[in-house]
Image (cartoon, rainbow, N blue to C red):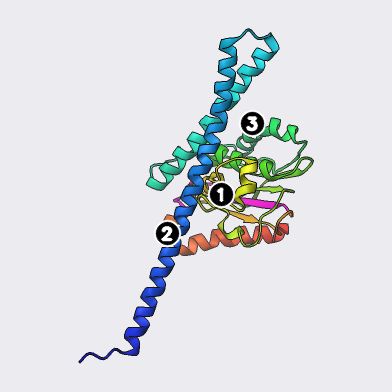
Amino acid sequence: MWISSNTDIDDQKRIEAELSRLYKEAESLNRAKDDFLATISHELRTPITSILGWAELLMMMPLDDATRRDGIATILQSAQTQAKLIDDVLDVSRMITGKLHLSIEPVDLESALRAALTALLPAANAKDIEIGLNFQADLPPLSGDTVRLQQIFWNLLSNSLKFTPAGGRIEIRLVAIDPKTVVVEVEDTGVGISPLFLPYVFDRFAQQDIGSHRNHGGMGIGLSIVKQLVELHGGTVSAFSDGENRGATFIVSLPMTAVAPLALQPAHAVERVRAREKTYAVSRGTR
């Protein structure tokens, strides 16, 4: 005769609880995947519709010079938007499969920041958003991938522009917090981040509010790409917000010299980097 013990029952309960947790996680991931596919379909369809519409007009009827220039400009802008969406999806795929690599070289961070900002100035001017710059002078070059660092800054600035109402302000800061670490901070007066969503803001496919997010456009993978690229440089990125409609601050901490990604570093090294970042955030009053 077999008699069950309390240990057997406890083990069974733990197994059932773990299976239930895994099932809920799988359901959540499936919902996120479905939301992402719906969003990407919408985001890709929008520029295609614009391109097709103007292409048909240009072929079917004579247009005056001004209208023709507007049509060509719209086609170009729509094609660039679509190319950016596709590049982001491909980057996510490369990150998941571990095939995204960096080309390390000396990088002038101020120039990289200004290049990203220049590309977004028309959008900022259209919303009458004030841009404040506070860059530490004479910073030495940082070891990194120029293209990927510009991508990090473009995504962060684009995110702030997207969620900051017309007439708002974005402050960009660049400072060395010690001889080995440089920090880039992007602070906005936008819609903010709810406390419940803040821990998930860098998760792939995570969206604070689906309806609101789609009104702003985008696929919800930009901040996930930022996190992956920053960590590939051996750095960290954090987000702070006092809540909805209270703005948000994103802090990127990067080593001056190229190092192994944090995931490959000893735990104590990771904690040192994050402790420096936290100290800087507290001193800036962002928490």
Q: Is residue 47 above or below residue 200?
A: above
Image coordinates of residue 190 in percent, x first then y, are 72, 48
Instruction: Give SS at disc 3.
Output: helix
Report whether 170 appears left or right of 221: right
Image coordinates of residue 133 in percent, x first then y, are 73, 41
Seen as rendered, the residue at the extreme left is 1
Q: How far apart, in angstroms, are the residues tagged by discs 2 and 3?
A: 39 Å
Q: Choose top left, top right, bottom left or bottom right for residue 273.
A: bottom right
For the residue marked with disc 1, what is the amino acid? Leu
Q: Are marks 2 and 1 in contact (CB under 8 Å)?
A: no
Relative depth, front residue between 83 and 5 = 5
Mark with earlier residue (2, 3): 2
- Answer few, some or many: residues within 10 Å of disc 2's Cα (few below 14, many 20 plus, some between 14 and 19): few
Which residue range is magenta in the image?
A: 247-261
Q: How far apart, in angstroms, are the residues tagged by discs 1 and 3?
A: 23 Å
**Any mark on residue 119, and which?**
3
